[in-house]
Amino acid sequence: MKSYIVGLLFIYCFAVWANGECPQGSTQLGTEPVCIYAFGKMASYLDALWTCNSLNGTTVLIKSAFDNTAIIALANQYFNDNPYIGVQKSSDGTWFYADRTNLTYQHWAPGEPRNTSGNYQCAVLDPGSGGWRAVDCVTPRPYFCSSPLPIPPTTPPPTTQPRPRCDSEWEYFQSYCYYLHDYNGYVYSFNSAESHCADMNAHLASIHSTDEDDFVYNLVPWMSHSSCETVYAWVGLYGSGKRGDGEWTDGTPVDYSIGSSTIWGDWGIPKQKDGSNYCSSLRYDYYSTWLSHNFGRFVCKKRSIY
Ligand SMILES: *[C@@H]1O[C@H](CO)[C@@H](O)[C@H](O)[C@H]1NC(C)=O
Ligand SMILES: *[C@@H]1O[C@H](CO)[C@@H](O)[C@H](O)[C@H]1NC(C)=O
Ligand SMILES: *[C@@H]1O[C@H](CO)[C@@H](O)[C@H](O)[C@H]1NC(C)=O
């Protein structure tokens, strides 16, 4: 019987993919957010309702003349028998939709709905007349289901996470990126540290404001180590440390000083885990006499990517 293969026909030939939104095997009802399933395999009304419920729907809800015409067309196309529609009679005799809402549209065939000893509590669509007919609910018939058009998964808005402005392992601060080369068993001379930074298209860090000073200082973690050499971190000052004297390895002027009492030279940041500057009483220490010295850590700096 032709009606038995309707489901397959729907899947392969008649599913409307224009919106790509109705599940496979169903077709959209015009432009409404409704998907229609046609079942040629006959079932009692309760079984039909059960199947429709499993599709997140009900027996088909016909809510306008347009809906009715569309369902008639489908019924004419696929069914030999009049299919169940989602219209039921309550015990008080009123007809309602299968989702328990009141009818907002009805299109009964002439003489319908018939009241045959009160048993006619379901309805079919008669494609011949285009009207609805009251019927008993137990006779197996084909049926239509309708279900809400699934809401397409909302694609999350493009992540507002900003693009990284620094290479990984570099820290961003005010248009520049900073890299701490932490102690890893080796120590570096001032020139060697600078050339390691140069290998990364950077220079040893220069410092031009209190904020930048704090940033760089805080970039270097406390460290407890037996040797002060490994504790210090090179930055790029080469000179006496007085404003306007000497320069930073990145060529910038010495336009900032952390204090008049501080004598700067080729200097580094001493940090001890206990919070005291065991290796120096100064935040930055002067190492012009240590030019031949090696430190375990250094801070590089370069312009951020954007
Ligand atoms: C079932 O329909 C409701 C709306 O009636 C919808 O919110 C829900 O996402 C649907 N569930 C599935 C699995 O389609
Ligand atoms: C449905 O119809 C009944 C009786 O006709 C009425 O009392 C009720 O308010 C209606 N419900 C809605 C939601 O319109
Ligand atoms: C429908 O049939 C039932 C049972 O015979 C009867 O009680 C009821 O009054 C009828 N309703 C109408 C509208 O004829």
Image (cartoon, grey):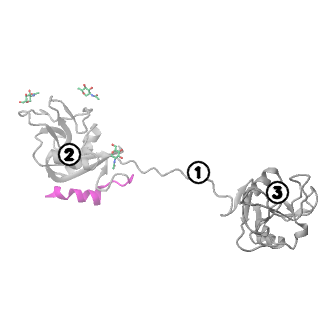
Residue hosting label 3: 283
Alpha carbon of mark 3 to alpha carbon of mark 2: how far? 80 Å
The residue wearing badge 1 is 160
Q: Quarter of the image containing the N terminus? A: bottom left
Amino acid at dot 3: Arg
Q: Which of the two marks, 1 or 3, is nearer to us in this view?
A: 3
Mark 3 and mark 1 in contact (Cβ < 8 Å)?
no
Q: Are dots 1 and 2 in contact, CB under 8 Å? A: no
In the rendered structure, which amino acid carries the disc numbered 2?
Leu
Residue picked out by circle 2: 49
Q: Position of residue 3 (x, y in %)?
A: 17, 55
Q: Nearer the viewer, residue 32 or 170?
A: 170
Residue 179 part of the magenta-drawn span: no
- Compared with 170, 119 (above or below) is above
Quarter of the view holding residue 221: bottom right
Q: Confirm or deny contact between disc 3 and disc 2 (CB under 8 A).
A: no
Q: Which residues are magenta?
A: 1-20
**What residue is drawn where x is 91% and y is 58%?**
263
Q: Quadrant of residue 45?
A: top left
